[in-house]
Amino acid sequence: MNLYLDDNMSKALLVALLRKAGHHVTIPAAVGIAGVSDARHMVYAVANALVVLTKDRNDFEDLHFVIQATRGQHPGILAVRLDNVTVKDMKDRDIVRAIGNLERSGISVATEFLVLNHWR
């Protein structure tokens, strides 16, 4: 999967694990847009056909709704929901496993907003 990790997901360990699992990973710092708004991250991902991976569930779900309302398309958004209980929150390896489970399911992520927690 071709992934774009927004600023809050661009940890070195997660990037390394995703790449080891065979994913192409782009992070904001590598393309010179670290710290920009979520809307600008989304524009970059759409322009470069990259699936967004984020913990900003509410912000990116709103962007998803705007794109749908205007009959636009996007490559997909994968959100990690934080449970506010640290021991329940998905760890890096959980995220990689969930993406693998999602891929194996055969479900298309294009134009979808999917919460990865359901794919553990």
Image (cartoon, rainbow, N blue to C red):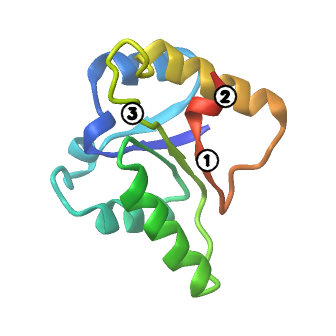
Q: Residues within 10 Å of mark 2 (few under 14, many from 20)?
A: some
The local secondary structure at tag 3 comes to: loop
Which amino acid lies under the numbered mark 3 shown in the image of this protein?
Leu
Q: Earlier in the sequence, mark 2 or mark 3?
A: 3
Q: Quadrant of residue 82?
A: top left
How far apart are the two marked residues, 1 and 3, measured between alpha carbons?
A: 14 Å
The residue lying toward the viewer, choosing from 76 and 48, is 76
The residue lying toward the viewer, choosing from 90 and 54, is 90
Q: Residues within 10 Å of mark 1 (few under 14, many from 20)?
A: some
Q: Quadrant of the N terminus?
A: top right
Residue projecting furthest to the left = 35
Residue at horizontal 62 percent and vertical 24 percent from the top? 98
Residue 44 x %, y %: 38, 62
The local secondary structure at tag 2 comes to: helix
Give residue 82's mark.
3
Residue at horizontal 38 percent and vertical 21 percent from the top? 14
How far apart are the two marked residues, 2 and 3, measured between alpha carbons?
A: 14 Å
Residue at horizontal 18 percent and vertical 50 percent from the top? 34
Give residue 87's mark.
none
The residue lying toward the viewer, choosing from 22 and 68, is 68
The local secondary structure at tag 1 comes to: strand
The residue lying toward the viewer, choosing from 50 and 116, is 116
Q: Earlier in the sequence, mark 2 or mark 1?
A: 1
Which amino acid lies under the numbered mark 2 shown in the image of this protein?
Trp
Q: Which residue is mark 1?
A: 114
Q: Is 99 placed left or right of 60 in the picture?
A: right
Residue 84 position (above or below residue 34): above
Q: Is 111 placed left or right of 87 in the picture?
A: right
Residue 55 x %, y %: 37, 41
Q: Which residue is mark 2?
A: 119
Q: Quadrant of residue 4?
A: top left
